[in-house]
Image (spheres, rainbow, N blue to C red):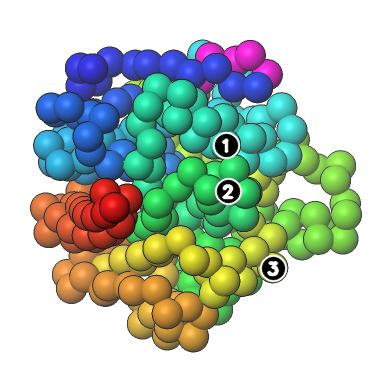
Amino acid sequence: MVEEKVWTFKARDEADLQYYFYSEGNEKNKPTIIFIHGITAELHHIRQFASKAKKEVNVIIPILRGYHPTLIRGDLQYKGQYDDDLEDLCLYLQSIDLQNVYWCGHSMGCGNLLRVLKKETVSKLSEGFIFLSPFFHPTLPVYNFQNSSNKDLNDIYELKLLKSILLYTLHQFKVQIFSKTKVVKVPDDFHENKLLHLSFRLMISRIPDARMLNTLYKSKIPLFMMIGDEDEVTDATKLAEWWKGRTNHPYKMQKGHNHNTIISEDSNVYEVIDWVKTIFDKQTKVTSEP
């Protein structure tokens, strides 16, 4: 498979969903990382990650619905459709004999990972989960916008999230009439200098139920969290304390890195690869022993 070529898999609704595949050498002998982007696609940063990692691991970058250039833009067909799509992707990879699967999420992509971690099919077919600069849930007391003015919030996110948070509150009270409302504008990675308008239904499909946070504590699957100490979105120290109180799984705070450089800087890429290879080597040793 050649770098930058777009491949497809078929979802349960018969839609052809696209993904990028990066690899060098025999892909079936290496672990595979599925990289789920955050509220913006960040393809530039994730492609840098994939280019640096492809000798050691396969990297798959799915183009999620709503961001996808050939499907409905900025919306989903139903709340929670991402969960089904990612489960279908996991099953598809098994069918083409890419069986050593690790999931990596960035920012709000980590919410997607928590959602699929609870799916029995995905958990059985996955070897580990990696959370980079995670945005798990808007109620966690670790995010900078919670103590910011409107202006500060927009400076931090370059997005308008207050409306999303308000609608999330309504959603908790089963108020669904605003599900198609466009609540966020993000840079459109597929159309230069344009914005992509995202619906509340899309946004809520990326946020786990608060009870799913217990998945971290209960998980027997290896987990790893990494954040930069200069993260603009999250108070890294508060998140580290929260993580330590929630799970015994390892984490790392990278000095001098922010919300996006955590993805693509060499030292961070190698931290992720080393963690994956350590888990992969242990699992390979166990399966090869008589």
Q: Quadrant of residue 214?
A: bottom right
Frontmost residue, 282 versus 54? 282
Disc 2 marks a residue whose amino acid type is Val
Q: Which residues are magenta?
A: 13-17
Question: Which residue appears at 45% of the width and 30% of the height?
Answer: 94
Q: In the figure, 29 relative to 238: above or below?
A: above
Q: In the shown orientation, is residue 229 left or right of residue 206?
A: left
Q: Quarter-wise, where is residue 156 in the image?
A: bottom left
Query: Marks 1 and 3, Cα distance to the nearest angstrom?
Result: 20 Å
Looking at the picture, tell me which residue is in the foreground, 57 or 268: 57
Which element is circle 1 on? helix
The image shows residue 24 at horizontal and vertical percentages of 14, 28
Residue 211 is a magenta residue: no
Q: CA distance from mark 1 to mark 2?
A: 7 Å
Where does residue 118 sit, x and y in percent of width and height? 62, 55
Residue closer to the observer: 258 or 166: 258
Q: Label 1: which residue?
A: 87
Which is more N-terminal, label 3 or label 2?
2
Q: Quick check: 275 above or below 106? A: below
Residue type pointed to by label 1: Glu
- Mark 2 → mark 3, Cα distance in angstroms: 14 Å
Would you name the residue on which mark 2 appears?
A: 116
Sequence order check, earlier mark of 1 and 2:
1
Of circles 1 and 3, the one toward us is 1
Left or right side of 121 for 249: left
Q: Is residue 192 visible?
A: yes
Q: Which residue is mark 3?
A: 211
Secondary structure mostly seen in the magenta stretch: loop
Q: Secondary structure at mark 2?
A: helix
